[in-house]
Amino acid sequence: MSYPKPKRLQFPKDEAQVSWLPMLLNAYFIADKGVYEAIQKRIKRGDKLACAKGCSSCCKIHITIPVYPLELVGIYWYAITKIGAPLRDALKENLRHFSTGDPCPFLIKGACSIHPMRPLACRHFNVFNKPCSPGEDPYYTRRQDVLTPLEKYKNKALAAMLPFHGIKERGKRKQAMRKGFLNSQVQNLHEVNWKNLALRMDGAVLK
Ligand code: SF4
Ligand code: SF4
């Protein structure tokens, strides 16, 4: 399988109104470029990308998926404003009934319902040579087949999220990265109370 050359996602009307959105889309574009470059390097070495549309056992078995605050906001925004019926109803149902350790609540019929807004962790997880067997986490069974994301892009993507936390100036961003500021902000997707998102999708205003 091939990994398409990344393009920056565009939501021009929304980006004009929602100040954090260009930040998140830029961060994802940087991350995607890094993944693309790392995959090309592996392909040149003779590896074949195994990840493909419809292949999703990774979304069922991973129970530690870091999500940064800006990513969480992006997921809320996308689910509330961009997902229409019938996917919307299926997603709300998943979110209402989700418990830690279940397959990811955003996985619907073998596909990621928030694919453009999937977190960095999901974007970075790519496997070569053969698809994961049901229940297999190749990180433990065949680490050599798991892509190692390029640090330069990974860090740039994270740094691009810092203005969301009021850390805008270059020097301060460097310092925040050095001190691992975002590590103190990250949540596990499996520990987020997704019922709140289902309520918001129903139009409730949460306190
Ligand atoms: S990580 Fe494994 S299960 Fe997930 S898409 Fe890639 S090959 Fe398929
Ligand atoms: S967010 Fe999407 S890609 Fe990530 S685990 Fe969930 S369904 Fe899979």
Image (cartoon, rainbow, N blue to C red):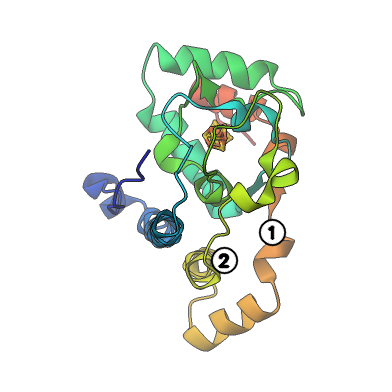
Task: Name the mark on residue 134.
Answer: none
Graded by Cα atoms within 10 Å as few (under 14), some (14 to 19) or many (20 or more), the crowding at tag 2 reads few
Residue furthest left as drawn: 12
Quadrant of res 132: top right
Do the CB atoms of the residues marked 1 and 2 lie less than 8 Å apart? Answer: yes
Residue 162 position, x and y percent, is 53, 68
Q: Quadrant of residue 196?
A: top right
Left or right placement of residue 91 versus residue 78 in this view: right
Amino acid marked by disc 1: Gln
Q: Residue furthest bottom?
A: 171
* Ligand 1 positioned in quadrant: top right
Front residue of 62 and 178 = 62
Residue that appears at 61% across and 25% down: 105
Residue 184 image offset from top left, x and y in percent: 74, 63
Instruction: Specify whether residue 204 is in view.
Output: no
The quarter of the picture where the N terminus appears is: top left
Beta carbon of the mark 1 residue lies under 8 A of ligand 2: no
Disc 2 residue type (three-letter): His
Residue 33 visible (yes or no): yes
Judged by depth in the image, the label closer to the viewer, 1 or 2, is 1
Measuring from the top left, give residue 123's x and y in whole percent: 50, 47
Counting residues from the start of the chain, the first of labels 1 and 2 encountered is: 2
Q: Which mark is residue 185?
A: 1
Say how many tags the image has. Answer: 2
Q: Is residue 95 above or below residue 205?
A: above
Q: Which residue is mark 2?
A: 165
Question: As rendered, which of 5 and 47 lies closer to the eye?
Answer: 47
